[in-house]
């Protein structure tokens, strides 16, 4: 929940511009941060093919409980389900589902997104429980999704709880359970990552399957696959570490580098210096095989 708090807090300032509508923005965001409700697909109180919004509830077509089916256009808009084209200069909010294209400085969809979000600053979707999204998010600052299959492209940060696809960020990508490719200066992960990480620092996963390529690569738990970098670290290494310095708690694969370090060896070390804490001769030059 701490990651959710940090990212969604960035939305507060822009969301306050909604004004005095039913279900004020501050209450909605507080609900997402503290007690996210399960998503339930539902129709709005009424439906409008076209809607216009000025201040998000204070002066717009319909109310926050209504649906917009074709076009929403405004400065700041707040409705329930929205599609197909959603254009808001400052802030666009959907309390339910969004289908189509959403464009604005800050885009927020509480339920699932099926389409594309283009945010000048922030794009957020699927913050309610059980609301998986499919499509793409792009923003200059932050893209956030609890569950997304698709693409996140951010000039700063991308965060998704779980999903599959591509994360492309200039600064950092964050994920808990991810399948696909992460490309950024920093790729930080939580539980289970399967795919490829390309960056200066790739670290944090409790279990990693695939390729880590960067200056520093780390896996806190089981690593299955290939690490290529200046420094490679893993808990239980089941694959190959190739770099200047390779370190693992347990090795059942290959370490190839200038210095290789393992506590419990059950594999091969090739390097200038090879250390295995539990071996009869802990330090050996050039080669060690512990199968």
Image (spheres, helix red, strand yellow):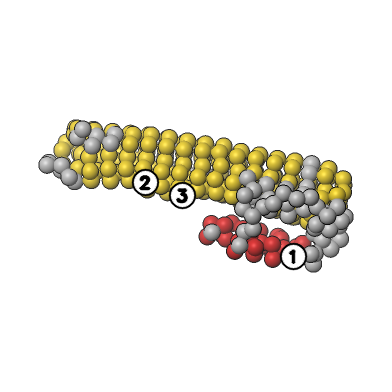
| Front residue of 154 and 263 | 263
Q: In the image, is residue 285 above or below residue 176?
A: above
Sequence-first tag of 2 and 3: 3
Badge 3 is on which residue? 190
Q: Which residue is mark 2?
A: 221
Helix or strand or loop: what does disc 2 sit on? strand
Instruction: Residue 60: give x, y in percent of width and height.
Output: 86, 57
Q: Residue at x 83, y 55 (%)?
A: 45
Q: Considering only order in the chain, which callout, 3 or 1, is on the residue closer to the N terminus?
A: 1
Q: Which residue is mark 1?
A: 24
Q: Which image quadrant: the C terminus? A: top left
In space, the residues marked 1 and 3 are separated at their CA atoms by 33 Å
Q: Secondary structure at mark 1?
A: loop
Image quadrant of residue 133? top right
Instruction: Report helix, strand or loop for mark 3.
Output: strand
Asked if one can make out residue 203 in the rendered structure from this viewpoint, the answer is no
- Near mark 1 (Cα within 10 A), the count class, few <14, some 14-19 or many ≥20, is some
Q: Mark 2 or mark 1, which has the lower sequence index?
A: 1
Label 2 to label 1: alpha-carbon separation? 43 Å
For residue 22, above or below residue 123: below
Q: Are marks 2 and 1 in contact (CB under 8 Å)?
A: no
- Mark 3 nearby-residue class (10 Å; few <14, some 14–19, many ≥20): many
């Amino acid at each position: 929940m701490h990651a959710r708090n940090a990212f969604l807090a960035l939305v507060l300032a822009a969301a306050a511009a909604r004004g005095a509508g039913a279900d004020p923005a501050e209450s909605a965001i507080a609900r997402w941060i503290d007690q996210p409700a399960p998503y339930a697909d539902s129709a709005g109180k009424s439906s409008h093919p076209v809607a216009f919004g000025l201040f998000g509830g204070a002066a717009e077509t319909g109310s926050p409980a209504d649906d917009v089916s074709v076009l929403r256009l405004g400065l700041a808009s707040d409705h329930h389900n929205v599609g197909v084209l959603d254009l808001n200069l400052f802030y666009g909010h959907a309390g339910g589902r969004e289908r189509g294209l959403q464009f604005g400085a800050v885009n927020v969809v509480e339920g699932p997104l099926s389409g594309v979000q283009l945010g000048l600053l922030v794009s957020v979707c699927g913050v309610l429980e059980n609301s998986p999204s499919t499509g793409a998010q792009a923003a200059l600052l932050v893209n956030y999704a609890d569950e997304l299959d698709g693409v996140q492209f951010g000039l700063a940060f991308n965060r998704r709880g779980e999903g599959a696809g591509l994360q492309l960020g200039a600064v950092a990508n964050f994920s808990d359970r991810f399948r696909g490719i992460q490309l950024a200066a920093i790729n930080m992960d939580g539980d289970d990552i399967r795919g490829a990480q390309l960056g200066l620092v790739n670290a944090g996963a409790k279990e990693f399957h695939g390729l880590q390529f960067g200056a520093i690569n780390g896996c806190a738990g089981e690593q299955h696959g290939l690490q290529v970098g200046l420094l490679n670290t893993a808990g239980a290494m089941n694959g190959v570490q190739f770099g200047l310095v390779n370190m693992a708690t347990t090795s059942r694969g290959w370490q190839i580098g200038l210095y290789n370090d393992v506590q419990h060896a059950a594999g091969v070390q090739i390097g200038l210096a090879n250390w295995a804490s539990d071996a009869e001769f802990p330090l050996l030059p050039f080669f060690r095989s512990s199968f």
